[in-house]
Amino acid sequence: MQLVKPSKAGTYESNDIYIMLFPGNETKIEVESIVYETYGDKIENVIFKTLNEYKIENVLVKAIDKGALDFTIRARLITAIKRGATND
């Protein structure tokens, strides 16, 4: 899969995450979270593993987290991937 257009998924509600994907020249993850000091590395790890699973490279991920659990982060990211990617 390859990201061909910007996409997004999620909300700014409590216990959710808003994820934006942009095609880029390298893979970069930016996370803003109310629990970043405690869970920032874990959030980035879930995002990175999901990108690898879907073979997505050269993407900028901007995530605004409001306390989402791992399965929510993964679901929002998969939705954004499917909205912006093609199966090349």
Image (spheres, grey):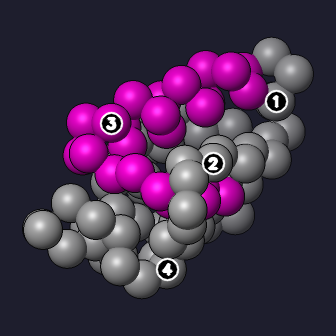
Q: Amino acid at mark 4?
A: Pro
The image shows residue 52, relative to residue 10, as above or below, that is: above
Q: Amino acid at mark 1?
A: Tyr
Answer whether labels 2 and 1 touch (C-beta < 8 Å). no
Q: Nearer the viewer, mark 2 or mark 1?
A: 2
The image shows residue 57, relative to residue 37, as above or below, that is: below
The image shows residue 66, relative to residue 47, as above or below, that is: below
- Near-viewer residue (33 or 15): 33
The residue that disc 1 covers is 36
The residue that disc 3 covers is 52
Look at the image and tell me in which quarter the N terminus lies.
bottom left
Answer whether labels 4 and 3 touch (C-beta < 8 Å). no
Q: Which mark is residue 28?
A: 2
Q: Amino acid at mark 3?
A: Asn
Residue at position x 55%, y 66% in the image = 24
Q: Nearer the viewer, mark 3 or mark 1?
A: 3
Q: Nearer the viewer, mark 4 or mark 2?
A: 2
Residue 83 image position (x, y, % from top left): 31, 76
Examine the structure image and report whether residue 61 is included in the region drawn in magenta. Answer: yes
Residue 36 image position (x, y, % from top left): 82, 30
